């Protein structure tokens, strides 16, 4: 198959993506925007050098088709991992409260000593998680079937986004 992938190519198949550069990371960032998780759904494994998140991801890749077909908005459980993490820091998050609901706004990369730098997960409410990495290696893997979003709607970010 040649050419770029199209949304229609995804169908109902679970997503499995890996980002190795900033352009790839922008794609994953767009797909996890508006994902929600509890504080307990984050796990830092220093020996494995892995930071993992279990997200309830809005299925952005299916929004246009679901609207056209009159289907409800769907979410899917997704594992997001940041590999090669040398250290992790956070701000604006009560790490002692496992029931806190967090909402992902974006994932970005701040270069450091090439090819390393920081992968930053920005959360609603001024929260952020920073993972110092050797190089970009961020993976997204859907782990459940899609389900109807409890809110039944797409979050509204206003006119500025």
Image: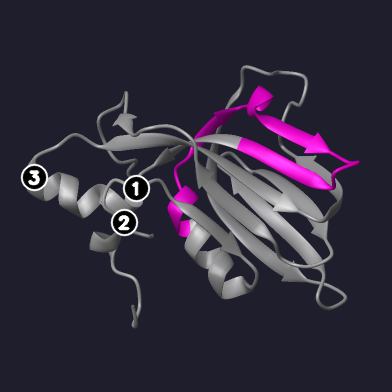
The spot of residue 86 in percent (x, y) is 89, 53
Quarter assignment of residue 66: top left
Residue identifier under label 1:
13
- Marks 1/3 in contact by CB < 8 Å: the verdict is no
The answer to which of marks 1 and 3 sits earlier in the sequence is: 1
Nearer-the-camera pick, 88 or 5: 5
Between the residue at mark 1 and the residue at mark 2, the CA separation in whole angstroms equals: 6 Å
The spot of residue 70 in percent (x, y) is 8, 40
Between the residue at mark 3 and the residue at mark 2, the CA separation in whole angstroms equals: 16 Å
Q: Residue at x 28, y 46 (%)?
A: 12
Nearest to the eye among marks 3 and 2: give it: 2
Residue identifier under label 3:
69
Q: Secondary structure at mark 2?
A: helix
Quarter assignment of residue 10: bottom left
The span picked out in magenta is 30-53
Q: Is residue 104 magenta?
A: no
Q: Residue lying farthest bottom?
A: 2
Where 7 falls versus 39 (above or below)? below
* Any part of residue 158 in sight: no
* Any part of residue 101 in sight: yes
Q: Secondary structure at mark 3?
A: helix
Between the residue at mark 1 and the residue at mark 3, the CA separation in whole angstroms equals: 18 Å
Looking at the image, residue 26 sits to the left or right of residue 133; the answer is left
The answer to which of marks 3 and 2 sits earlier in the sequence is: 2
Q: Residue at x 34, y 50 (%)?
A: 60
Q: Residue at x 9, y 50 (%)?
A: 68
Mark 1 closeness class: few <14, some 14–19, many ≥20 residues within 10 Å: few
Q: Is residue 42 magenta?
A: yes
Looking at the image, residue 34 sits to the left or right of residue 150; the answer is right
- Marks 3/2 in contact by CB < 8 Å: the verdict is no
Q: Quadrant of the N terminus?
A: bottom left
Q: Secondary structure at mark 1?
A: loop
């Amino acid at each position: 198959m040649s050419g770029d992938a199209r949304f229609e190519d995804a169908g109902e198949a679970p997503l499995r993506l890996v980002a190795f550069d900033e352009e790839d990371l922008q794609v994953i960032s767009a797909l996890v925007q508006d994902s929600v998780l509890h504080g307990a759904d984050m796990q830092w494994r220093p020996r494995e050098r892995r930071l993992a998140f279990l997200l309830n991801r809005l299925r952005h890749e299916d929004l246009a088709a679901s609207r056209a077909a009159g289907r409800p908005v769907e979410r899917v459980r997704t594992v997001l991992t940041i590999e090669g993490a040398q250290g992790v820091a956070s701000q604006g998050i009560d790490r002692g409260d496992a029931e806190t609901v967090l909402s992902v706004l974006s994932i970005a990369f701040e270069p450091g000593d090439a090819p390393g730098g920081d992968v930053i997960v920005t959360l609603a409410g001024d929260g952020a998680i920073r993972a110092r990495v050797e190089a970009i290696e961020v993976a997204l893997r859907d782990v459940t079937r899609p389900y109807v979003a409890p809110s039944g709607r797409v979050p509204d970010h206003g006119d500025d986004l």
